[in-house]
Image (cartoon, rainbow, N blue to C red):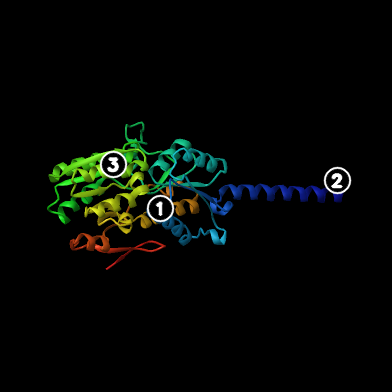
Amino acid sequence: MKPAILSALTAMMILIGCSSESSDNQANKSPSEKKTPTVGYIQVFEDQTLDAARKGFVDALKENGFNEDSGTVKIIFRSAQNDQANIPQILDYFIGEKVDAIATNPTVAMIAAVGKTKTTPIFMMVGPSPEIAGITKPDSSGKAVAPANLSGVYETLEYIDTSVALIRQTLPNAKKVGTIFNSSEPNSVNAMNRVRAICQQLGLELVEASVTNSNETQQVMASLIDKNIDVFFALPDNIIFASFETVNNMATEKKIPVVTSEAGLVARGAFIAYGADFYQWGHQAGVVAAKYLKSGDLKSAPLELVVERKRVFNPKAAAALGITPPAGFVELKYTQTRLDCKD
């Protein structure tokens, strides 16, 4: 064989070997090493409360090396503008774009996402456990298991018990509790069942009303007020998030305290709460998502129970009602970056 031909063949074999090695190395790399990972973030609507969770999620990604400003991650944010018909379209777009992960906020988006994809990792926040959401299926042993591609951070219904108990603790003379729930949202229906049970245990009369659209809230709230409720319990569901200012303003005008289970609603005017800080909830979900983006293995980033809950009150609401919050509750203020407690 001529030297020139031998040299050419040798060079070709080296190139093929390098190409094969490069391909193998690429296959073994995590998503963040292969390319800039893309996260599709879907939020059902935008308000202070849900935006705090989104802020926490993005901050956690930054703290773990995934920063849009430095080009180490791409986040595609889409809001459904409080129209559930937009949710499947947004998810289809994410799937078509082959995003590396989908972040959902709150429950409705999470349920829709697990119905759309069984392969793309989903990182939930501001939502209940898979069992409560009704998205588990029995495995071969009969044990209820969540979708294999679902991760993130969830809440249980135990917070309802403590939150409703605040009424007895803070407002001992209250007898009649009014509340509104979303009859089309499984999380809200399940929470409502828990409210009924705890009110019965505490000897509180519950006056409830169901709605399916935030446009109905004003009329329904007026009806509850006409029934002489002593306190309003604000369930943390989509209806309340979307129309909270209407609810709170109507209650405040009649000197009716608003008790809830979510710190963000206290920042928006509710009197008192024991429950999750939504910034921290989103932050915790962001940490979980970052674990996956680093490893490429969802087993390294399993579902977690929300960790941080707070006992908080709104000083303006307390002053307007003439009520002193019990010991152990801290004053809450809202900043553009997060919810802060002031000792």
Above/below status of 50 relative to 206: below
Tell me the crowding category of disc 3: few under 14, some 14 to 19, or many 20 or more residues within 10 angstroms, Cα based: some
Which label lies toward us, 1 or 2? 1
Q: Nearer the viewer, residue 159 or 22?
A: 159
At label 2, counting other C-alpha atoms closer than 10 Å, the crowd grade (few under 14, some 14-19, many 20 or more) is: few
Q: Residue at x 37, y 42 (%)?
A: 215
Mark 2 lies on residue: 1
Residue 185, position in %: x, y?
Answer: 34, 38
* 10 vs 303, nearest the viewer: 303
Most foreground residue, 279 or 219: 219
The Cα–Cα distance between marks 1 and 2, rounded to whole angstroms, is 75 Å
Q: Residue at x 30, y 49 (%)?
A: 247
Report the residue marked by disc 3.
Answer: 220
Residue ID for mark 1: 47
Q: Please name whichever residue, 339 or 210, is drawn nearer the observer in this view of the structure.
A: 210
Sooner in the amino-acid sequence: mark 1 or mark 3: 1
- N-terminal label among 3 and 2: 2
> Hey, what amino acid is under mark 2?
Met
Structural distance between the alpha carbons of marks 3 and 2? 92 Å
Residue 152 vertical placement versus 316 (above, below)? above
Q: How many marks?
A: 3
Three-letter code, disc 1? Asp
